[in-house]
Image (spheres, coloured by chain):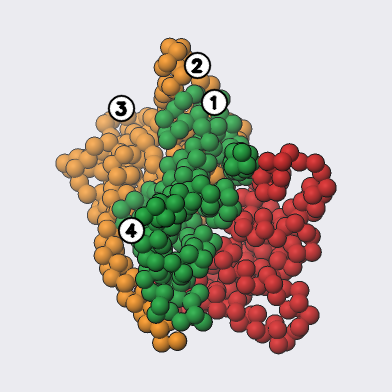
């Protein structure tokens, strides 16, 4: 039951993009087409899950026993950066079709704050390893949901007449605002579970 | 090539270790000060050190809350209880609730929360008596806009005699508008604090010695 | 000198990180529920930006090209951690309200972007001016957004009450208001720039 709560909250109530403001840059950058949005979501899900597990183990196994918590930010970002590189190399070797699909998004992920944000948040929230993984996957699902909905809206938006100053990012931001408003409707839904 | 990267890493780690050493004490001091300030704000004036005399009280749920007794001379003047709720809109809420010896809430302080800014975060002041703060346009044009009256204050009331739950649930306290979940969680934390300290053994012993006779009967009711 | 001044002004106006380059959107949206929070976040980022620009510009000849990016990240992360520790020690209330967005300065594209695009190619002095300029542009943008959201949402500006809170539109303090307010500000900036 606890896990269902975590999942519902992470996807709908506290959506990473629309309520917690993490990963906005790729949210605005790669949402012009549905295809790229799906690719980015898949890459984020993949890296986020692995990165959360690795950083969690690193925190509990290395930083905390030696009292090195102050190196958290620096270690986490280095681990994430090298992890992204490694994932890229492995995918390239193992599954070229997958690399074709995700390849271009992987380098962008290092500076996606969702990854580092979730890695730090699960430590702050004092989650266990299992709830951390559940939280990471649910957060990624929330990210995918927001990104894909948003990209479908933007595809439609590209066909409409928008005042000149509003074209591009401004109208996208306002659309995101309205989407965020819609997601606020989920507030309190977790109390049901 | 790798050597230079290693060198930069070592330099960075060394620098951080140094800064960590330098800021460790100020950080713990700041935390201790925050706790002391919170206690000072929620109980009547005292002259002992409540942090040193604090003790734990078990709750019904099986965990425990920390109670800080405030004394003036040898008399107990109040208790500050560090209570919490996990049912806030964004999870955990930590509050410090102060009671006087008649069980009334003297004041409270929110120690930590992650509630929505502008909505749930209003709990920091919401449950205190409303202050009529004049805004700039009211000052300039010299009129006053009447604010909506709420019966939201818990100050000076006792959870024993007043129903500390939101009016929507049949209680006597008005919830923060659009933040019922936060309000419920906050009041839960206050009730928990009250239950914990009234049920502690320490309460009956100290309570009996300092509460005047006529008040003692009132509390029993 | 005039060149450096131009770099500084470019950072604030022509290359404004928020309104023109559209970088660093996460802290821009997340920490601007009040003017003071937005300004503090901007200043913290500015500090990291100036320091990392300075260090990277002075070390650029010692850092091999291949390990450039990891080296930059280490340098940036070091300054971010310093900011985090100092804030926790001396401004605990502010550290609480900015929360996770302080460590996340590390992944703010502006900082790494300026390191890569400017500091790695220019002199220490120009890099300093670039850091101050971009940092100032970021701080001004965040403060402006914070002022707009706080004013619309609660009738206050830097905690000074302008009209009673009851008339505020709470939406502007909440998440959707952040997107909408920034959207309009970017549109206005676009319009003004085009003239």
The reply to whether callout 3 and callout 4 are in contact (CB within 8 Å) is no
Marking on residue B100: none
Instruction: Look at the numbered disc 4 and give the secondary structure of its residue.
Output: helix
Looking at the image, is mark 2 or mark 3 earlier in the sequence? 2
Circle 3 packing at 10 Å, graded few (<14), some (14-19), many (20+), is few
Tag in front: 2 or 4: 4
Residue that appears at 58% across and 70% down: A110
Task: Look at chain C in the picture and name its colour.
Answer: green
Q: Which residue is mark 3?
A: B214
Q: Which chain does the numbered disc 1 sit on?
A: C
Front position in the image: A16 or B191: A16
The reply to whether callout 1 and callout 4 are in contact (CB within 8 Å) is no
Q: Is residue C180 in view?
A: no
C86 left or right of C31 in image: left
Q: Which residue is mark 4?
A: C86
A159 left or right of B61 in image: right
Marking on residue C166: 1
């Amino acid at each position: 039951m606890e896990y269902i709560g975590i999942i519902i909250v992470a996807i709908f109530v506290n959506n990473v993009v629309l309520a917690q403001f993490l990963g906005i840059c790729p949210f605005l950058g790669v949402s012009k087409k549905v295809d790229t949005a799906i690719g980015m979501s898949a890459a984020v899900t993949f890296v986020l899950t692995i990165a959360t597990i690795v950083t969690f183990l690193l925190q509990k196994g290395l930083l905390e026993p030696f009292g090195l918590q102050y190196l958290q930010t620096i270690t986490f970002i280095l681990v994430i950066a090298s992890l992204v590189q490694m994932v890229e190399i492995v995918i390239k070797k193992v599954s070229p079709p997958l690399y074709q699909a995700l390849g271009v998004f992987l380098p962008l992920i290092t500076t996606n704050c969702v990854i580092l944000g979730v890695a730090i948040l699960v430590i702050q929230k004092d989650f266990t390893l299992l709830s951390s993984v559940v939280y990471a996957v649910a957060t990624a699902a929330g990210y995918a949901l927001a990104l894909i909905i948003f990209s479908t809206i933007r595809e439609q938006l590209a066909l409409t007449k928008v005042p000149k100053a509003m074209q591009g990012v401004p109208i996208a931001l306002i659309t995101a605002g309205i989407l965020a408003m819609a997601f606020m409707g989920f507030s309190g839904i977790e109390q049901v579970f | 090539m790798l050597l230079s990267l290693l060198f930069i890493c070592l330099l960075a780690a060394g620098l951080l270790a140094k800064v960590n050493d330098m800021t460790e004490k100020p950080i713990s001091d700041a935390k201790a000060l925050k706790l002391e300030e919170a206690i000072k704000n929620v109980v009547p004036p005292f002259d002992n050190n409540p942090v040193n005399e604090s003790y734990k009280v078990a709750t019904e749920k099986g965990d425990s809350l920390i109670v800080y007794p405030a004394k003036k001379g040898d008399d107990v003047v109040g208790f500050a209880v560090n209570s919490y709720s996990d049912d806030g809109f964004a999870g955990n809420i930590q509050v410090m609730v102060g009671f006087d010896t008649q069980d009334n809430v003297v004041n409270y302080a929110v120690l930590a929360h992650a509630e929505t800014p502008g909505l749930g975060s209003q709990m920091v002041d919401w449950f205190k008596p409303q202050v009529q703060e004049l805004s700039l346009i009211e000052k300039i044009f010299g009129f006053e806009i009447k604010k909506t009256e709420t019966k939201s204050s818990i100050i000076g009331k006792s959870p024993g005699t007043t129903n500390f739950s939101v009016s929507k649930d049949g209680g006597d306290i008005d919830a923060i508008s659009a933040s019922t979940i936060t309000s419920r969680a906050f009041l839960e934390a206050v009730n928990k604090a009250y239950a914990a300290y009234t049920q502690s053994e320490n309460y009956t012993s100290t309570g009996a010695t300092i509460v005047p006779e006529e008040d003692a009967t009132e509390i029993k009711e | 000198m005039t060149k450096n001044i131009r770099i500084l002004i470019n950072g604030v106006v022509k290359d404004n990180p928020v309104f023109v380059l559209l970088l660093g959107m996460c802290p821009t949206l997340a920490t601007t529920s009040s003017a003071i929070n937005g300004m503090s976040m901007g200043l913290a980022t500015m500090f990291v930006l100036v320091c990392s620009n300075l260090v990277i510009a002075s070390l650029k000849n010692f850092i091999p090209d291949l390990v450039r990016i990891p080296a930059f990240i280490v340098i940036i992360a070091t300054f971010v951690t310093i900011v985090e520790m100092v804030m926790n020690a001396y401004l605990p209330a502010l550290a609480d309200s900015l929360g996770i967005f302080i460590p996340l300065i590390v992944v703010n594209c502006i900082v790494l972007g300026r390191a890569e695009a400017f500091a790695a190619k220019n002199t220490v002095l120009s890099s300093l001016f670039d850091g101050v300029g971009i940092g100032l542009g970021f701080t001004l943008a965040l403060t402006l957004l914070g002022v707009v959201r706080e004013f619309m949402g609660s009738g206050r500006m830097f905690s000074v009450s302008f009209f009673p809170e009851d008339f505020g539109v709470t939406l502007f303090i909440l998440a959707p208001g952040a997107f909408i307010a920034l959207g309009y500000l970017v549109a206005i900036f676009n319009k003004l720039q085009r003239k």
